[in-house]
Amino acid sequence: MKNGLYCFANHFSSSIEHSTRLRLKAKKSYGQHFLHRDDIAARIAASLTQPYERVLEVGPGKGMLTKHLGAPGRAVVAVEADRDMVEYLDARPPLEGLRVISADFLQVDLSKTFDNQTFALIGNFPYNISSQILFKMLDYRDLIPEMVGMFQKEVAVRVVSGPGNKDYGVISVLLQAFYEGKYLFSVDKSAFQPPPQVQSGVIRLLRKPQPSLPCDEALFRSVVKITFGQRRKMLRNTLRPFFSQQPEALQDDFFLKRPEQLSVQDFIELTLRVQETKNRT
């Protein structure tokens, strides 16, 4: 009888372990690719420029990066949409200061995560929603002085690219208006299980001292998106509707440029010109 119970217990334990392994397979719906290189995870965690008291991780998965975020006196919140991963993390030895939230990061009110206190944002971000994560960060930039994250390399390069570069675009300008970006290092697809079809890159974004613009921010976003929507056209063509009452303003040589030639400061000045024109009409 004893042997029978022992065999049953072993079989039951193996069944749970097998079931857990099945549920922990990467899911395409979450854009999951699990990092299995501990040295890379440690390097990402060490890329934060300060020992922040509060850190929010997006998409912890199996916790490869999470375990490197713990520090004395630090509060860590990990937001995970996959409930199987949440159960897995909850079952592991607890990390001091860690709180796991089962939720879609894009739906979380970040002002409530740390009671409206500032925090660093970090993660091996799901590639299928990486741009949305960055735009959400912009919405909460008053709370987020720094972000370190791994993205599809193409996106990482685009975020930090400057004027005159083919990768420079809407996301480059909108993020660089408020953050200083730096490309840190590349990560080969072999570092993941399953391997993604693309290479990856880690970047850092540090908020500028004045995270606001001297122009209408909604109009700034609109101007950036409109001009890059037809990036091969000169500004005098894409912005003509804004100057219908003052077409002579478009004779300025400034409007002979294309959007990829403009710096963030140029876009601010351009927005101010549009703003001034709108105020006159």
Image (tube, rainbow, N blue to C red):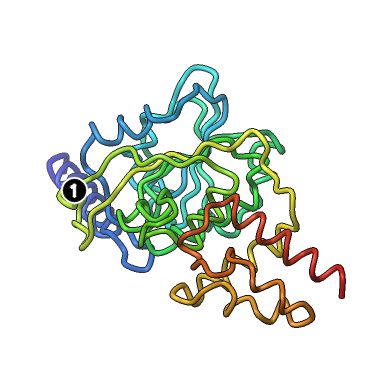
In the depicted structure, whether residue 16 falls above or below residue 117:
below
Image spot of residue 52 (x, y percent): 54, 25
Q: Is mark 1 on a helix, strand or loop?
A: loop
Label 1 sits on what residue type? Asp
Which residue is more in the foreground, 7 or 200? Answer: 200
Q: In this view, does 216 lie to the left or right of 236?
A: right
Instruction: Identify which residue is drawn at 77% across, 77% down.
Output: 246
- Which residue carries the number 1 mark? 188
Apparent side of residue 263 relative to residue 20 in the rendered image (left or right): right
100 vs 41, left or right, is right
Instruction: Give the residue drawn at x 63%, y 63%.
Output: 221
Identified at 31% across, 67% down, the residue is 28
Figure check: 36 above or below 151: above
Foreground residue among 96 and 174? 174
Tell me if residue 235 comes above or below residue 97 in the rendering. Answer: below
- Name the image quarter holding residue 167: bottom left
Q: Where is residue 38 in the image (x, y as percent from the top left)?
A: 24, 34
- Given the current orientation, which residue lies at the most extreme right position? 280
The quarter of the rendered structure image containing the C terminus is bottom right
Percent position of residue 237, x then y? 57, 80
Is 38 rendered above or below residue 161? above
Q: Which residue lies at the image location 44% right of the left edge and 26% below the top edge?
A: 70
253 lies left or right of 125? right
How would you rate the neighbour count of disc 1 (Cα within 10 Å): few for under 14, some for 14-19, many for 20 or more? few
